[in-house]
Amino acid sequence: MTPRPKLMLAAALGAAGLLTTACGGSAVSDSSNASGQGSGLARGCPDNGTTGLTDTTIKLGLSQPLSGPYVSVGGQLYGMQAYFAYVNSQGGIQGPDGRKRKVELVYKDDAYTATKAKANVDQLVNRDKVFALLGQFGTAGNLAARPIIAQQCVPSLFATTGAPELANPKYPWAIAGSISYATEGRILGQYVRDKHPNATVAVLEQDDDLGRAYLQGFEQAIAGSGVKVVATQTFEAGEPDVKNQITTLAATKADLYFNVASGLTGLQALNHVHASGWRPEVIQVAQLPVTLLRRLQPGAGDRLITGGTGPDFANPEVAAGNEEFQLYMQWFRKTPGADKIDPLSASQGWFQGRLLDWTVRHATTMDRVGVMESARSIDYTGPSFTLPGIKIHTTPDDPHLFEGMQLNRFDAAKGRLVPLGEVIDIDGQVKYEPVS
Amino acid sequence: MNKNVTRALWAGLLCLLALAPFVVGTVEISAFQKVVYLSVAVMSLNVLTGFNGQASIGHSAFMGIAAYFTALAVQSHGWSYWAALPASILVAALVGALAGVPALRIRGMNLALVTLGLGMVFPQLPIRFTEETGGTQGMPVDEPLAAPAFLNVSDVAWRYWVLLALAALVFWLVRNFRASRVGRAVIAIRDQPIAAHTAGVNVAATKIAVFAVSAGMAGLAGWMFTVANQFVSPSDFTVLVSINLLLGMAIGGSGTLAGPVIGAVFLHYIPEAVNGTGIDPVLTPALYGLILILVVYFLPGGAAGGLAQLSARFAASRRSPDEPGQAPPSTPRLTSSTSHP
Amino acid sequence: MALFLQRLIDGIGNGMLYGAVALALVLIYRATGMVNFAQGEMAMFCTFITWKLADHEFGLGLPIVAGIAGGVIFGFLFGAALERVVIRPFESADHLRQMIVTLGLFLAINALAAWIFTADTQRLASPFPSGALRLGGVSVSYHQLGVIAVLLVMALALRELFGRTRLGLAIRGASMNPESSRLLGVDVSRMLMIGWGLSAAIGALAGALVAPAVFVSPGMMQTLLLYGFAAAVLGGFDSAPGALVGGVMVGVVQAMVSGYVPAVGTQLQLATAFALILMVLLVRPQGLFGRVSVERV
């Protein structure tokens, strides 16, 4: 080396030495591992319970896809913004301390990449200093960010995923906002067991944790009955077509067809089933909303049963008769960028906002522990998009928000869901178990 | 540019980066970690494409193989990260060598097709083995790469230093390699394959070796990925990641040392910048595509090549202010469009 | 037996979809000597135009055949414009740079489609009657039959174009040997522009034919693309009928493997396509129908 780099090195070292003595809070002496005092939820938490709060504002964060191939599932953000515009126009969310706080929502794009979601949550928690996360999107993203949430004791409320893993008691700071896939599978299985006690079932299953969770719940419910799964075919998410699988399943001529496929693949499968001449009763998982079912080829949607937690808002009469939905639409239309978003898929965001409002209002103390405890003892009966009879209920030992569903028959001619029998609610019966 | 000045700049940059954890917080250091492993990943592609002239749209697969290998070894089989380091690099290099064998007969666009296939197939593998890997929901690694207790520094800073040191080592090796006899043979194969063959270079063996080395470097980036994120999922190793690496290489400048660093900085910070501008984030990839095309058009040598030209012109004009500055002959575009005043 | 026949028909039906994508890839390769990674995205964009023209809920509600015609015409103009504005500056660049440019187009067109149209899944009607022809225990939908007929006609027409017509020969000449073509008075740039336009138009038609099966969305062509490459490689990248035969072979192999080889089953179908590409390139790089190209030094 020539003298010059040495000189520079010395200068840089000197400067850094000065900086080190001057600055606290650098990465080298990261103190986030330090344990604080407390019991229960707060055990091992750093002392940061009111981060993200001022006397007049509450800061919330969210990472979800806003670009890339999965951008269409990210509509919830607009529903959330609509709710917060509404509640801010009323002065904000009232906390247990009697103060009203306006909501500031910080959102970041993760293009549905898990580690990007983790980096975003890291920024939201450690740089933007949000009070809590709301509607954190996607199973992988939630699991990737979980250590940060656990370490900093940040409530991650009503995450948008149905993965049963979100109920893992080892991680009490996150709570899912969608019905668990396993629970839904169980309710569908219960219906089959009761209505068709000796049926044969052919299954198309997405070959991953999502498909497995559904099937695990379904098999639990039909265990010990005369219902028999006679064939299972799997597919990889993202495959262009599932025709080959359907030909194999159609050859079984089973009474029922359980379609554990979402979105586009689900539609294809149903079209192929119809084209094959096989006419089973179709049990469809709720991952295929009615707006998509309407895009089935004529005849392919006949004899189809699917569950849901809410009324069929795709039916204009139902939507017009629901006050909460009208209020939502009124604010949704005013949200910038919402004109390109499907209001039905975005409505989840509105309800997540509504539920957060309730949770903060009913907290015992206005800090993170208070709000998280409140989220784990919800008994919500206010305005919602949920059908009466489905409890919105959590306890410290049972973080499952919904455990009930209304089964519907799809009326293909009118493109509507027609309720079938009573709501099935198994509140309190679902226990956490890992998907295997 | 003066060799000593270049050296001093690299040394200074390294010092500044090494001292960063004393100054900035954990969020920034996490971002730096990402830039470091992206630099190594872009460099791995650079060795293959920039030096040897073989193209690959499958480097996300090599990264993914090593990242998953590390995650499985540490999480499910109780290995230490340090034991997984050489093993994961070796596994990636081995797969790379296998991929390099068809590369002998398959050239140019066909090779790109094969590697595209590799990149598209890889994310399906962890999903196929969901029991072991967690499938689409991904796989957390609970064990961090912890700092030795006697140092009394945080894990984040320690991980960053480890990554930075390894990356510096890789860059230093690549620099020496490029100047070596073998390195010159590798570059000769890019420019004059037949002449190289006539001059006694074993083209076939060299090509396979370069493919393996490049895949091994991508594997190192994969190991770094798992160390930095403690999480792997199929969504992190899609073919789009490969395309992004190509983007980073093209923007930074292929065949240079500084290029991969510039490219990695671009890949990490541009999406953040786009989010700040109020442009609809849906358009981020479109912006990427546009920048990619513009850079290939206006700066065929990438940002690093552009910088080198600028400084060469600057040096030349200082030497003889009356004469037109002389740019390197390989890049006539800049000289013609920005002629000397 | 009926099940076997059904699998065969499934395979042919799927294979035709791969063949449709392969056809567009082959065309641009013959016309310009480039492999265009943005081919699938261009087809997707044109399919959105067709959808916009034909859809009753979100579009103009024109008859589907008019929509497809509009999409194909748009495709020709779109392809020609892309060549003129984006590709021409790289006409004499090396393969690597051309590849990076088409990858840039890939990113840009995909994101633009999501932004301009929608990222949701949309349905496109088939131009053929619904329902299926049933023979014994086997069913073939009219859509499948129609697709096969259209693609066969198209492949033969392309062969005629490149084999017999003055325009076709000029296009081929311009891509294979630009210097000599110029000397013979052929406007090389213009030929390349026409080549891009034609292949984008064929892509638009292919998109409209696959859309009733795979629906319309920004990602609709992305997995098909690898199968399309497999079909094109198998057929030998410069033969239009070869692309269709290649596609059908990929489809039939897939259907048979998934039906009768339980160890592979329906998993890793993409890997099957990949293995096929690799095998062909190693054993017979010119494909089944391609000609060996002699490289001069």
Image (spheres, grey):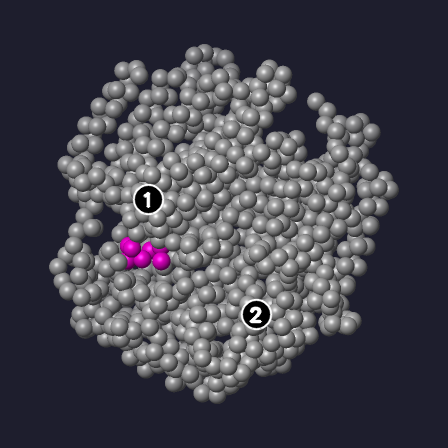
**Amino acid type, mark 2:** Ala
**Amino acid type, mark 1:** Trp
Question: Considering only vertical position in the picture, is A45 above or below A363?
Answer: above
- The quarter of the picture where the N terminus of chain C appears is bottom right
Q: Which residue is mark 1?
A: B79
Residue depicted at x 43% and y 17%: B315
State the predominant SS element of the stretch in magenta. Answer: helix
Residue B174 lies in the magenta-colored region: no
| Spatial separation of the CA atoms under disc 2 and disc 1 | 40 Å
Question: Considering only vertical position in the picture, is A200 above or below C208?
Answer: below
10 Å neighbourhood of mark 1: few (<14), some, or many (≥20)? some
Give the image location of residue C50, x and y in percent. 67, 61
10 Å neighbourhood of mark 2: few (<14), some, or many (≥20)? some
Q: Are marks 2 and 1 on the same chain?
A: no
Give the image location of residue A163, x and y in percent. 40, 65
Find the magenta span and give its range. Answer: A143-149
Helix, strand or loop at mark 1? loop
Query: On the image, which quarter does residue C252 sit in?
Result: bottom right
Q: Which residue is mark 2?
A: A231
Question: Considering only vertical position in the picture, is A362 above or below B148?
Answer: below
Residue A145 lies in the magenta-colored region: yes
Which residue is more in the foreground, B262 or B207?
A: B207
Give the image location of residue C166, x and y in percent. 85, 40
Residue B236 in sight: yes
Give the image location of residue B185, x and y in percent. 53, 20
Question: Considering only vertical position in the picture, is C99 above or below A107?
Answer: above
